[in-house]
């Protein structure tokens, strides 16, 4: 028997015997953070630009408003990040947002105690998520089509059960959960931070998170290694639906109105765009909650800042479109240059 | 070396048959693999090599015949059954996740846990220790598999197969996609496996690799066993003759 498989001492310059030299491993971490640092840099630069144009942008009140605007997108972006990392896609969130809101709203106006109504509304979202998962897993319908289908389904349902009329007349104890503040900081921001931390830990540290990454990175390999990918999909879409409904309910509490026309396609696109701009790959396996938070803040900033400096809000979509395409182009470029034998 | 016939085979197949509709993929296939030996399975396209692998790894169930592990009958309903019984399979696609690092890939589906959490430290330490034990030189187990060469990926896949505690290792074309130097590395690792007392079954197209590596070679032809030879007592010409059908241990007329 030979003494060594790979000579340890003779490290030649091309050294492909040595697995991934230390530098490339360090670069991996660096890569991950450079993109987020780049995004944070964009947010800062934009902030400086808006402040120079109009000092009110950097006021305490406006920054809180900006963050509050980002929260509902971010809360939904958290499970969406997990879905994308897991190799899926959930376009139904905008409609589930409205359906969750009006379901809980109708329950409240029909006399259900609001804590139970919240659970009921979230359960409707979970149900839509489970339908999404079943359609993709068992009917082999691509996630894009399945969730666009359930987007229309859920959106239609929200209109039908309300006859298209806004639901209002909620008790103060309910509306306060969406509109009150603590120490000058809206509750919504606290919710977003708590949910963000939970999803970050789930994705980065837990067996569930590791399995999501594996399933999204290479579904057949994950399945071949006894990772139950269908069950993962169920959990992911159910969480996505449940949290989207919950966000809709919080939005309704904030505005004291549950509208069947809340959320919608614009909400879906904002959420998915924030996730992708935050560095989560459309092709699965790669993504962070922190990135999605930055993505959501960037869009809230753009939205807010353009209004503060009196730019026609109609221009906003043009910027968002450009940013989205640029972000995905950067993702593609990085993939091509990272992996020797590419996917 | 102990004469194989004097020992119990770690893995034995008896009269295995598998049909897909009207196609008979395997018909009465016997096979014996022993600890501390490399058994090569060779054959032309359509000889039944892939079906045989899938039966041993639990992907397919045979229509007929028995699987014995160390003399005890075994039934594999799903691949997890084979894995639990100590049979690890390295398929040609390797089943690695390119965007994940080496140590995560080593523990895919069996992450060391602390409650709901993955014990990252334990995973990295065990991966490093295990690869070192296999004399695979590694400076970082945190490198993404997608950044490794084909040979390195093959080695990770094989290492993972044995990490799970398997003592029977099934390799599907382990050198098919590799360059000359990488092939040499993979062969060294396979020898290391054998020397550690594992039972290695290696399906290959490459006659040279077979003669370098194997202790015994079993030739399949059209779903049947055309012959089994000790490498020391045969020649490449004889094996090729068995593969092409110019020579056969089977009576010719039994082919339906």
Image: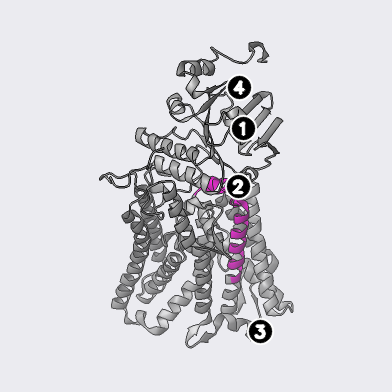
Quadrant for the N terminus of chain A in the image: top left
Q: Nearer the viewer, mark 3 or mark 1?
A: 1
Q: Nearer the viewer, mark 2 or mark 3?
A: 2
A126 lies above or below B185: below
Q: Nearer the viewer, mark 3 or mark 4?
A: 4
How far is the residue under mark 2 from the one under mark 3? Answer: 42 Å
Image position of B212 (left or right of B21): left
Circle 2/circle 1 CB separation < 8 Å: no
Q: Can residue A144 be seen in this view?
A: yes
Query: Which contiguous range is marked in magenta?
Result: A218-246
> Both on one chain, marks 3 and 4?
no
Quadrant for the C terminus of chain A in the image: top left
A217 lies above or below A127: above
Residue bearing mark 2: A141
Residue bearing mark 1: B7
The chain under label 3 reads A
How far is the residue under mark 3 from the one under mark 1? Answer: 81 Å
Q: How many labels does the image show?
A: 4
Which label's residue is closer to the chain start, 2 or 3? 2
Q: B46 or A62, which is in the foreground?
A: B46
- Looking at the rendered structure, the secondary structure element under dot 1 is loop
């Amino acid at each position: 028997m030979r003494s060594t498989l790979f000579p340890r001492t003779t490290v030649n310059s091309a050294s492909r015997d040595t697995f991934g030299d230390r530098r490339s491993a360090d670069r991996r971490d660096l890569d991950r953070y450079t993109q987020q640092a780049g995004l944070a840099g964009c947010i800062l630069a934009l902030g400086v630009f808006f402040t120079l144009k109009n000092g009110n942008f950097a006021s305490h009140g406006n920054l809180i408003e900006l963050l509050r605007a980002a929260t509902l997108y971010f809360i939904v972006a958290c499970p969406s990040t997990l879905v994308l990392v897991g190799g899926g896609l959930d376009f139904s969130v905008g409609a589930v947002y409205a359906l969750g809101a009006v379901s809980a709203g109708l329950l409240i106006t029909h006399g259900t105690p609001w804590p139970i109504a919240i659970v009921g509304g979230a359960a409707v979202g979970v149900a839509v998520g489970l339908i999404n998962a079943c359609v993709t897993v068992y009917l082999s319908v691509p996630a894009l089509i399945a969730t666009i289908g359930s987007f229309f389904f859920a959106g239609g349902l929200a209109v039908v059960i309300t006859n298209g009329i806004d639901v209002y007349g909620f008790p103060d104890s309910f509306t306060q959960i969406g509109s009150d503040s603590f120490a000058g900081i809206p509750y919504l921001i606290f919710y977003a931070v708590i949910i963000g931390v939970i999803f970050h830990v789930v994705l980065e540290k837990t067996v569930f998170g590791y399995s999501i990454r594996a399933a999204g990175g290479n579904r057949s390999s994950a399945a071949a290694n006894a990772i139950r990918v269908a069950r993962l999909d169920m959990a992911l879409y159910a969480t996505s639906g449940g949290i989207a409904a919950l966000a809709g309910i919080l939005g309704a509490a904030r505005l004291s109105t549950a509208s069947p026309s809340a959320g919608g396609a614009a909400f879906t696109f904002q959420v998915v765009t924030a996730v992708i701009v935050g560095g989560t790959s459309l092709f699965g396996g790669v993504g962070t909650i922190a990135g999605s938070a930055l993505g959501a803040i960037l869009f809230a900033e753009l939205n807010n800042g353009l209004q503060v400096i009196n730019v026609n809000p109609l221009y906003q979509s043009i910027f968002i479109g450009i940013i989205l395409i640029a972000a995905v182009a950067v993702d593609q470029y990085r993939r091509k240059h990272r992996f020797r034998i590419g996917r | 070396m102990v004469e194989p016939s004097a020992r119990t085979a770690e893995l034995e197949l008896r009269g295995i048959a598998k049909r897909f509709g009207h196609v008979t993929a395997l018909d009465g296939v016997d096979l014996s693999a022993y600890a501390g030996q490399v058994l090569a399975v060779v054959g032309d396209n359509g000889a039944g090599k892939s079906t045989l692998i899938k039966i041993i790894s639990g992907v397919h169930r045979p229509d007929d015949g028995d699987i014995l592990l160390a003399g005890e009958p075994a039934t594999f309903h799903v691949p997890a059954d084979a894995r639990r019984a100590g049979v690890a399979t390295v398929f040609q696609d390797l089943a690695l996740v390119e965007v994940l690092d080496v140590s995560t890939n080593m523990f895919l589906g069996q992450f060391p846990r602390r409650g709901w959490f993955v014990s990252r430290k334990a995973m990295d330490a065990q991966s490093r220790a295990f690869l070192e034990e296999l004399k695979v030189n590694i400076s970082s187990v945190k490198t993404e598999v997608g950044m490794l060469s084909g040979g390195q990926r093959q080695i990770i896949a094989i290492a993972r197969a044995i990490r799970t505690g398997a003592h029977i290792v099934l390799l599907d074309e382990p050198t098919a996609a590799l360059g000359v130097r990488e092939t040499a590395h993979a062969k060294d690792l396979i020898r290391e496996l054998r020397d550690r007392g594992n039972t290695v079954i290696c399906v290959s197209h490459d006659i040279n690799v077979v003669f370098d590596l194997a202790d015994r070679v079993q030739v399949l032809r059209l779903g049947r066993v055309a012959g089994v030879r000790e490498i020391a007592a045969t020649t490449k010409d004889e094996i090729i003759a068995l593969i092409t059908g110019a020579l056969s241990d089977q009576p010719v007329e039994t082919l339906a």
